[in-house]
Amino acid sequence: MALTLTPAQRRDWLRLSLSENVGPVTFRQLIERFGDASAAIAALPELSRKGGLSRPLRLYGEVEAETDLEHGEAFGAQAVAAGEKHYPELLRHIDAAPPVLWIKGKAEFANASAVAIVGARNASALGFKFARKLASEIGQAGHLIVSGLARGIDTAAHETAMATGTIAALAGGIDSVYPPENGKLQAEIGERGLLVSEMKPGTTPRAEHFPRRNRIISGMSRATIVVEAALRSGSLITARRAAEQGREVFAVPGSPLDPRAEGTNKLIREGATLLTSAADVLETLNQTFSPARSMFLEPDSIFVHPVEASETDRQNILSLLSPSPVDLDDLIRESGIAPAAVAGIVLELELAGRIVRHPRGAVSLCVD
């Protein structure tokens, strides 16, 4: 059964997601522990104090959240919470799924079968041609095309798939146009396709937003295709996120003499499936697909039934942490502390800004 929030609950979900030091994983744990966003917000100051924060935690205000919702609505967008009808089901299953997603356009696209096509901004003529061919054939086979609205391969994929269905994941707010030359394309997708963003309206995209955007591209897709990519390309981040999310990764091989093929050739060496035609992807998509455990609406007893930790327990956990990521299971084993208590301590430390979460449940100490 899909989640349905009241207007007040939606406002509070947005407030909690935008409060200081509340990342997607912590958001989920807070909802599971306290039952709703309002109760979680009320508990944040004390939890952060226990974690060692010496000043008041910055909470996102009711007025600010209401204003964001009004701005989104005025733009024709809506904020959907993880678990609601128009929140992408595949995205809901990834590690660190966005608690709130802003969408504009054909909401029914959110849960259609989709394939991501990404690649170089300065693509070759052959790269453009092959990306368009893939987008056309995969689209005609009944699958949407997801990409990031960047210059190059992304743009070619979106333009080609407009006739069959496309989704653009944005790095900035859903009302922020980037790159500027794609303003017309973005507006068209907002009418005929679907725009999605986890950033609140009015957010200008910054460098740190793009990796977050990339996990949404792969998270909404059953498979990710990289057409061309240099070794330091953001497309490789999307491919890595797809692999971490348990999704299929395809890469188009290229000449060893072309820097734009270095990234895709590297992906193939590391285990990505070599792709020479749309048939390679379509064969995989015809197989049964079951995403991993959902990050929302499937409570984890560790967080639902918290155990109060002592100050000695907190110091024990801190002594085991370092700037290098360590798995939560390793902290539990080495500390000898109850799993629920360790989870609670890690939650408090994150709210205090003392640790960083990494993919697959690892944590590390913040480095000033």
Image: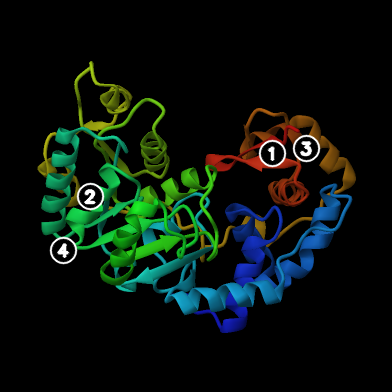
- Image height of 104 relative to 173, above or below: below
- Of tags 1 and 2, the one toward the viewer is 2
- Of tags 4 and 1, the one toward the viewer is 4
Label 2–label 4 contact, CB within 8 A: no
Label 3–label 4 contact, CB within 8 A: no
> Does residue 162 appear left or right of residue 86 in this picture?
left
Q: Residue at label 3?
A: 317
User: Between 188 and 341, which is closer to the camera in this rendering?
Assistant: 188
Identify the mark at residue 157; answer none if there is no mark.
Answer: 2
Taking the spot 19% from the left edge, 35% from the top edge, the residue there is 127
Taking the spot 59% from the left edge, 53% from the top edge, the residue there is 25
Identify the mark at residue 332; answer none if there is no mark.
Answer: 1
Q: Amino acid at mark 3?
A: Ile
Q: Earlier in the sequence, mark 4 or mark 1?
A: 4
Q: Amino acid at mark 1?
A: Ile
- The image shows residue 277 at horizontal and vertical percentages of 11, 39
**Displayed quadrant of residue 228:** top left
Q: Earlier in the sequence, mark 2 or mark 4?
A: 2
> Does residue 290 appear left or right of residue 317 in this picture?
left
User: Between 29 and 135, which is closer to the camera in this rendering?
Assistant: 135
Q: Earlier in the sequence, mark 3 or mark 1?
A: 3
Q: Is residue 218 visible?
A: yes
User: Between 344 and 348, which is closer to the camera in this rendering?
Assistant: 348
How far is the residue under mark 1 from the one under mark 2? Answer: 46 Å
How far is the residue under mark 4 from the one under mark 1? Answer: 52 Å
Label 4–label 1 contact, CB within 8 A: no
Q: Secondary structure at mark 4?
A: loop
